[in-house]
Amino acid sequence: MIRRTDQVNLAIAAGAAVFYALFAPLSAHTSVNDGLGPDGLAFGEMVRQFTLKGGDETSRLSPLFPALAWLPYQLTGNVVTAFAVVNRLALGVLVFAACRVLDTR
């Protein structure tokens, strides 16, 4: 059973993610490497070449990031969009965790 404070925390986290999703497109975006930025090519390739069997040494050492971005990439076919989806989900998780920490004080 979900506690009432968790319901409020989920609402706050969802609100933060929606707020970010609404206003992030208004901010400036880079055109370097087709929107991936100066260091994004390596991360983009990790997502494009992700398999459940493992990949290169880097993706085997840190498999969570390419695994999380792989599903949105498969649905959209766009690495930049996949990263944006992961950013919004990560923000929601972070805000929820911060709310839980603040509830314990």
Image (cartoon, grey):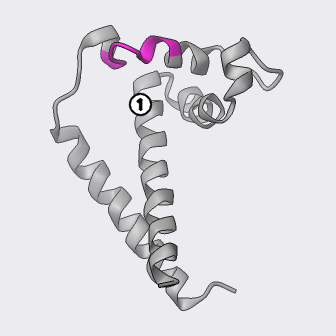
Q: Does 13 lie within the magenta span?
A: no
Residue drawn where x is 79% and y is 26% of the image: 52
Q: Is residue 103 visible?
A: yes
Q: Amino acid at mark 1?
A: Thr
* Residue 85 x %, y %: 45, 41
Q: Which residues are magenta?
A: 35-42
Position of 84 compared to 69: left or right? left
Rendered image quadrant of residue 8: bottom left
Where in the figure is residue 24, as x and y percent of width and height? 24, 43
Q: Nearer the viewer, residue 19 or 91?
A: 91
In the displayed structure, 20 sits above or below 30; it is below
The residue that mark 1 highlights is 81
The reply to whether the magenta stretch includes residue 38 is: yes
Name, please, the residue furthest toward the bottom: 4
Q: Residue at the far right: name it.
A: 53
Q: Quadrant of the N terminus?
A: bottom right
